[in-house]
Amino acid sequence: MAPSLHYSLMHSAPRRRVTGRTVVLDRMLERLPLFRLSDSADAAAISLATEDGGRWRVLPSPGDRLPGTFDQDVYVELLRRYLEAGSPADGGLTFTLHAFLRAIGRKVDGRNYDLLRSSLSRLERTTLESQGVYDSPGIMVDDSDRCRFSILASVVIERRRAAERSQLSLFPGMSGGEPGDVRVTLGHAIRCNLAAGHTSTLILGKYLALGSPVARRLYRLIAASAEPGTTVYEVELERLAELLPLTQRYPSHLLRVLEPAHEQLVEAGIVESAGIHQDGRTWRLTYSFNGTAPDGSEVSAENL
Protein backbone atom coordinates (compact mmCIF):
# COMPACT_ATOMS: atom_id res chain seq x y z
CA MET A 1 0.00 0.00 0.00
CA ALA A 2 1.28 3.45 -0.86
CA PRO A 3 2.15 5.68 2.10
CA SER A 4 -0.45 8.18 3.25
CA LEU A 5 0.04 11.66 1.81
CA HIS A 6 -1.54 14.85 3.09
CA TYR A 7 -1.08 18.46 2.17
CA SER A 8 -3.11 21.65 2.36
CA LEU A 9 -4.46 23.08 -0.85
CA MET A 10 -4.30 26.62 0.48
CA HIS A 11 -3.50 28.63 3.58
CA SER A 12 -6.19 29.25 6.13
CA ALA A 13 -7.98 32.58 5.89
CA PRO A 14 -8.92 34.85 8.78
CA ARG A 15 -12.46 34.13 9.90
CA ARG A 16 -14.91 36.98 9.81
CA ARG A 17 -18.61 36.71 10.49
CA VAL A 18 -20.70 37.75 7.52
CA THR A 19 -24.31 38.68 8.12
CA GLY A 20 -27.05 39.34 5.62
CA ARG A 21 -29.91 37.69 3.83
CA THR A 22 -30.13 33.93 3.87
CA VAL A 23 -31.47 31.38 1.42
CA VAL A 24 -33.11 28.21 2.73
CA LEU A 25 -32.85 25.19 0.40
CA ASP A 26 -34.14 21.61 0.31
CA ARG A 27 -31.33 19.73 2.06
CA MET A 28 -32.21 16.42 0.42
CA LEU A 29 -32.08 17.92 -3.06
CA GLU A 30 -28.89 19.87 -2.32
CA ARG A 31 -27.02 16.63 -1.65
CA LEU A 32 -27.73 15.39 -5.18
CA PRO A 33 -26.25 16.51 -8.51
CA LEU A 34 -28.66 18.77 -10.37
CA PHE A 35 -26.89 21.45 -12.47
CA ARG A 36 -24.11 20.87 -14.96
CA LEU A 37 -21.22 23.22 -14.24
CA SER A 38 -21.28 24.48 -17.81
CA ASP A 39 -24.02 25.63 -20.16
CA SER A 40 -23.14 23.21 -22.95
CA ALA A 41 -25.72 21.59 -25.19
CA ASP A 42 -24.82 18.13 -23.86
CA ALA A 43 -28.16 16.35 -23.53
CA ALA A 44 -26.92 13.30 -21.61
CA ALA A 45 -28.70 12.66 -18.33
CA ILE A 46 -27.00 13.30 -15.00
CA SER A 47 -27.02 10.09 -12.98
CA LEU A 48 -25.89 8.95 -9.55
CA ALA A 49 -25.93 5.48 -7.99
CA THR A 50 -25.81 4.87 -4.24
CA GLU A 51 -24.20 1.98 -2.39
CA ASP A 52 -27.58 0.64 -1.28
CA GLY A 53 -28.89 0.38 -4.85
CA GLY A 54 -30.60 3.76 -5.14
CA ARG A 55 -30.53 5.74 -8.34
CA TRP A 56 -30.89 9.43 -9.20
CA ARG A 57 -31.27 10.93 -12.67
CA VAL A 58 -31.75 14.42 -14.11
CA LEU A 59 -33.49 14.10 -17.47
CA PRO A 60 -33.63 17.03 -19.91
CA SER A 61 -36.80 17.88 -21.79
CA PRO A 62 -36.70 16.69 -25.42
CA GLY A 63 -34.82 19.24 -27.51
CA ASP A 64 -33.46 21.10 -24.49
CA ARG A 65 -30.21 20.85 -22.55
CA LEU A 66 -29.69 20.00 -18.91
CA PRO A 67 -29.82 22.80 -16.31
CA GLY A 68 -26.45 24.57 -16.11
CA THR A 69 -24.63 27.42 -14.42
CA PHE A 70 -27.18 30.14 -15.19
CA ASP A 71 -29.99 27.88 -13.98
CA GLN A 72 -28.17 27.28 -10.69
CA ASP A 73 -28.27 31.01 -9.92
CA VAL A 74 -31.90 31.26 -11.01
CA TYR A 75 -32.78 28.37 -8.68
CA VAL A 76 -31.09 30.00 -5.67
CA GLU A 77 -32.83 33.32 -6.36
CA LEU A 78 -36.22 31.59 -6.65
CA LEU A 79 -35.70 29.97 -3.23
CA ARG A 80 -34.63 33.31 -1.77
CA ARG A 81 -37.81 34.92 -3.05
CA TYR A 82 -39.90 32.03 -1.73
CA LEU A 83 -38.46 32.51 1.78
CA GLU A 84 -38.84 36.29 1.73
CA ALA A 85 -42.42 35.96 0.47
CA GLY A 86 -43.25 34.04 3.64
CA SER A 87 -43.17 30.56 2.05
CA PRO A 88 -46.63 30.82 0.41
CA ALA A 89 -48.64 27.63 0.81
CA ASP A 90 -49.44 27.40 -2.90
CA GLY A 91 -45.78 27.89 -3.85
CA GLY A 92 -46.66 30.85 -6.06
CA LEU A 93 -44.16 33.64 -6.76
CA THR A 94 -44.64 36.72 -8.96
CA PHE A 95 -41.93 39.03 -10.27
CA THR A 96 -40.72 40.80 -13.40
CA LEU A 97 -37.84 39.45 -15.42
CA HIS A 98 -36.23 42.90 -15.18
CA ALA A 99 -36.16 42.78 -11.36
CA PHE A 100 -35.02 39.16 -11.35
CA LEU A 101 -32.04 39.82 -13.62
CA ARG A 102 -30.95 42.73 -11.45
CA ALA A 103 -31.20 40.55 -8.33
CA ILE A 104 -28.81 37.92 -9.74
CA GLY A 105 -26.37 40.56 -11.00
CA ARG A 106 -27.05 40.11 -14.70
CA LYS A 107 -27.20 42.88 -17.28
CA VAL A 108 -30.76 43.75 -18.23
CA ASP A 109 -30.81 43.26 -22.00
CA GLY A 110 -32.54 41.18 -24.65
CA ARG A 111 -30.08 38.31 -24.48
CA ASN A 112 -30.46 37.87 -20.74
CA TYR A 113 -34.24 38.14 -20.99
CA ASP A 114 -34.10 35.20 -23.40
CA LEU A 115 -31.75 33.27 -21.10
CA LEU A 116 -34.02 33.80 -18.12
CA ARG A 117 -37.18 32.80 -19.98
CA SER A 118 -35.43 29.62 -21.16
CA SER A 119 -34.09 28.91 -17.67
CA LEU A 120 -37.49 29.14 -16.00
CA SER A 121 -38.99 26.87 -18.64
CA ARG A 122 -36.11 24.41 -18.20
CA LEU A 123 -36.61 24.28 -14.42
CA GLU A 124 -40.23 23.37 -15.08
CA ARG A 125 -39.63 20.80 -17.83
CA THR A 126 -36.49 19.04 -16.57
CA THR A 127 -37.49 15.78 -14.88
CA LEU A 128 -35.85 14.75 -11.61
CA GLU A 129 -36.14 11.00 -11.11
CA SER A 130 -35.36 9.20 -7.88
CA GLN A 131 -35.40 5.54 -6.97
CA GLY A 132 -34.82 5.26 -3.25
CA VAL A 133 -32.63 8.39 -3.07
CA TYR A 134 -34.75 11.55 -2.71
CA ASP A 135 -37.32 11.69 0.08
CA SER A 136 -40.04 14.23 0.84
CA PRO A 137 -43.40 14.15 2.65
CA GLY A 138 -44.90 15.51 -0.56
CA ILE A 139 -43.59 12.90 -2.98
CA MET A 140 -45.52 9.94 -4.39
CA VAL A 141 -43.54 6.79 -5.17
CA ASP A 142 -44.52 3.72 -7.20
CA ASP A 143 -44.07 0.05 -6.30
CA SER A 144 -40.36 0.21 -7.18
CA ASP A 145 -39.81 3.26 -4.92
CA ARG A 146 -39.46 5.50 -7.99
CA CYS A 147 -40.73 9.06 -8.16
CA ARG A 148 -40.53 11.94 -10.62
CA PHE A 149 -40.85 15.66 -9.97
CA SER A 150 -39.54 19.05 -11.10
CA ILE A 151 -38.23 22.19 -9.44
CA LEU A 152 -41.06 24.35 -10.80
CA ALA A 153 -44.59 23.00 -11.17
CA SER A 154 -45.69 25.80 -13.52
CA VAL A 155 -44.33 28.89 -15.28
CA VAL A 156 -46.40 31.68 -16.85
CA ILE A 157 -44.64 34.62 -18.52
CA GLU A 158 -46.92 37.42 -19.71
CA ARG A 159 -46.04 39.83 -22.48
CA ARG A 160 -46.34 43.55 -21.94
CA ARG A 161 -49.77 45.03 -22.45
CA ALA A 162 -50.31 46.95 -25.67
CA ALA A 163 -50.52 50.26 -23.80
CA GLU A 164 -47.08 49.63 -22.33
CA ARG A 165 -45.57 48.51 -25.65
CA SER A 166 -46.67 51.78 -27.27
CA GLN A 167 -44.35 53.63 -24.90
CA LEU A 168 -41.26 51.56 -25.75
CA SER A 169 -40.30 53.89 -28.61
CA LEU A 170 -39.46 56.47 -25.95
CA PHE A 171 -36.77 54.16 -24.62
CA PRO A 172 -34.45 53.10 -27.48
CA GLY A 173 -32.51 50.70 -25.28
CA MET A 174 -35.55 48.50 -24.66
CA SER A 175 -36.81 45.80 -26.98
CA GLY A 176 -40.40 45.65 -28.16
CA GLY A 177 -40.48 41.96 -27.38
CA GLU A 178 -39.57 42.46 -23.74
CA PRO A 179 -41.62 40.31 -21.36
CA GLY A 180 -43.63 41.61 -18.45
CA ASP A 181 -44.80 39.78 -15.37
CA VAL A 182 -43.93 36.23 -14.38
CA ARG A 183 -45.71 33.77 -12.11
CA VAL A 184 -44.08 30.50 -11.13
CA THR A 185 -45.07 27.75 -8.73
CA LEU A 186 -42.38 25.99 -6.71
CA GLY A 187 -42.65 22.19 -6.85
CA HIS A 188 -44.74 20.49 -4.14
CA ALA A 189 -42.03 18.02 -3.07
CA ILE A 190 -39.53 20.82 -2.43
CA ARG A 191 -42.09 22.92 -0.56
CA CYS A 192 -42.91 19.98 1.72
CA ASN A 193 -39.26 19.43 2.63
CA LEU A 194 -38.84 23.13 3.38
CA ALA A 195 -41.98 23.13 5.56
CA ALA A 196 -40.76 20.01 7.40
CA GLY A 197 -37.44 21.68 8.21
CA HIS A 198 -35.35 19.38 6.02
CA THR A 199 -33.24 22.34 4.96
CA SER A 200 -29.79 23.80 4.51
CA THR A 201 -28.94 27.48 4.58
CA LEU A 202 -26.75 29.75 2.48
CA ILE A 203 -25.69 33.30 3.21
CA LEU A 204 -26.58 35.14 0.02
CA GLY A 205 -23.69 37.60 0.20
CA LYS A 206 -21.19 34.75 0.46
CA TYR A 207 -22.81 32.87 -2.39
CA LEU A 208 -22.75 35.89 -4.70
CA ALA A 209 -19.12 36.61 -3.76
CA LEU A 210 -18.08 33.34 -5.37
CA GLY A 211 -17.10 33.98 -8.96
CA SER A 212 -17.14 30.42 -10.30
CA PRO A 213 -20.08 28.02 -10.70
CA VAL A 214 -17.93 25.23 -9.19
CA ALA A 215 -17.37 27.26 -6.01
CA ARG A 216 -21.07 28.08 -5.77
CA ARG A 217 -22.03 24.43 -6.15
CA LEU A 218 -19.39 23.42 -3.57
CA TYR A 219 -20.86 25.92 -1.12
CA ARG A 220 -24.34 24.44 -1.65
CA LEU A 221 -23.06 20.88 -1.20
CA ILE A 222 -20.96 21.58 1.91
CA ALA A 223 -23.81 23.51 3.56
CA ALA A 224 -26.16 20.56 2.99
CA SER A 225 -23.70 17.76 3.83
CA ALA A 226 -21.76 19.01 6.85
CA GLU A 227 -23.37 17.62 10.00
CA PRO A 228 -24.49 20.20 12.60
CA GLY A 229 -21.90 20.81 15.29
CA THR A 230 -18.97 19.41 13.31
CA THR A 231 -15.99 21.38 12.08
CA VAL A 232 -15.12 19.39 8.95
CA TYR A 233 -16.72 17.84 5.89
CA GLU A 234 -14.87 14.92 4.31
CA VAL A 235 -15.61 13.29 0.98
CA GLU A 236 -13.78 11.03 -1.48
CA LEU A 237 -12.59 12.93 -4.54
CA GLU A 238 -14.28 10.49 -6.93
CA ARG A 239 -17.59 10.82 -5.10
CA LEU A 240 -17.31 14.60 -5.01
CA ALA A 241 -16.92 14.61 -8.80
CA GLU A 242 -20.21 12.71 -9.07
CA LEU A 243 -22.03 14.99 -6.61
CA LEU A 244 -21.03 18.31 -8.17
CA PRO A 245 -20.99 16.91 -10.96
CA LEU A 246 -17.67 17.23 -12.82
CA THR A 247 -16.86 15.48 -16.09
CA GLN A 248 -13.12 15.14 -15.38
CA ARG A 249 -12.10 11.75 -14.02
CA TYR A 250 -8.34 11.80 -13.32
CA PRO A 251 -7.43 13.14 -9.84
CA SER A 252 -4.93 15.64 -11.25
CA HIS A 253 -7.57 17.05 -13.62
CA LEU A 254 -10.21 17.23 -10.89
CA LEU A 255 -7.88 19.03 -8.51
CA ARG A 256 -6.98 21.54 -11.21
CA VAL A 257 -10.67 22.41 -11.53
CA LEU A 258 -11.28 22.44 -7.78
CA GLU A 259 -8.27 24.48 -6.65
CA PRO A 260 -9.51 27.95 -7.78
CA ALA A 261 -12.94 27.13 -6.31
CA HIS A 262 -11.28 26.24 -2.99
CA GLU A 263 -9.44 29.55 -2.99
CA GLN A 264 -12.74 31.39 -3.47
CA LEU A 265 -14.39 29.45 -0.64
CA VAL A 266 -11.59 30.44 1.71
CA GLU A 267 -11.59 34.08 0.60
CA ALA A 268 -15.37 34.29 1.15
CA GLY A 269 -14.98 32.80 4.65
CA ILE A 270 -17.08 29.72 3.86
CA VAL A 271 -14.31 27.26 4.75
CA GLU A 272 -11.13 27.83 6.72
CA SER A 273 -9.08 25.43 4.63
CA ALA A 274 -9.31 22.55 2.18
CA GLY A 275 -6.90 19.63 2.09
CA ILE A 276 -6.30 16.49 0.07
CA HIS A 277 -5.28 13.16 1.58
CA GLN A 278 -4.17 10.12 -0.42
CA ASP A 279 -4.12 6.62 1.01
CA GLY A 280 -3.25 4.05 -1.62
CA ARG A 281 -5.50 4.65 -4.62
CA THR A 282 -8.08 6.66 -2.68
CA TRP A 283 -8.08 10.46 -2.52
CA ARG A 284 -10.13 12.31 0.08
CA LEU A 285 -10.91 15.99 0.49
CA THR A 286 -11.30 17.61 3.90
CA TYR A 287 -13.01 20.99 4.27
CA SER A 288 -12.52 22.68 7.63
CA PHE A 289 -14.70 25.48 9.01
CA ASN A 290 -13.55 25.66 12.62
CA GLY A 291 -15.46 28.28 14.56
CA THR A 292 -18.17 29.06 12.00
CA ALA A 293 -20.40 26.65 10.08
CA PRO A 294 -21.05 27.15 6.34
CA ASP A 295 -24.42 28.80 7.12
CA GLY A 296 -22.67 31.42 9.26
CA SER A 297 -23.68 30.00 12.65
CA GLU A 298 -21.11 29.50 15.38
CA VAL A 299 -19.78 25.96 15.94
CA SER A 300 -19.93 25.21 19.65
CA ALA A 301 -17.24 23.10 21.26
CA GLU A 302 -19.92 21.18 23.20
CA ASN A 303 -21.40 19.99 19.89
CA LEU A 304 -18.18 18.57 18.45
Image (cartoon, helix red, strand yellow):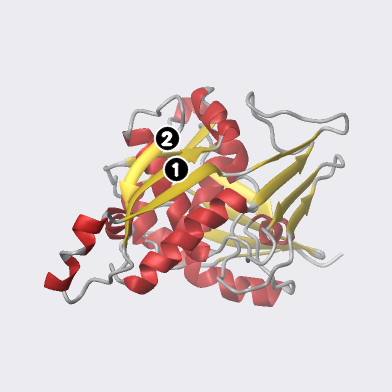
Q: Which residue is mark 1?
A: 184
Residue 271 visible (yes or no): no
Q: Which residue is mark 2?
A: 92
| Relative side of 72 to 279, left or right | left
Residue in the image at 65% along x and 53% along y: 33
Residue in the image at 76% along x and 52% along y: 48
Label 2 Cα crowd, 10 Å radius (few <14 / some 14-19 / many 20+): some
Whether residues under marks 2 and 1 lie with C-beta atoms below 8 angstroms apart, the answer is yes
Count up the numbered dots.
Answer: 2
Q: Position of residue 179 (x, y in %)?
A: 34, 59
Q: Which dot marks residue 1?
A: none
Q: Position of residue 161 (x, y in %)?
A: 27, 54
- Location of residue 96 with respect to 113 vertically, above or below: above
- Compare marks 2 and 1 and give the one earlier in the sequence: 2
Q: Quadrant of residue 240?
A: bottom right
- Please identify the quadrant where the N terminus is shown: bottom right
Label 1 Cα crowd, 10 Å radius (few <14 / some 14-19 / many 20+): many
The three-letter amino acid code for the residue at tag 2 is Gly
- Front-most of 196 and 2? 196
Q: CA distance from mark 2 to mark 1?
A: 6 Å
- Location of residue 261 with respect to 185 vertically, above or below: below
Q: What secondary structure is marked by label 2? A: strand
Q: Position of residue 118 (x, y in %)?
A: 49, 62
Residue in the image at 51% along x and 29% along y: 194
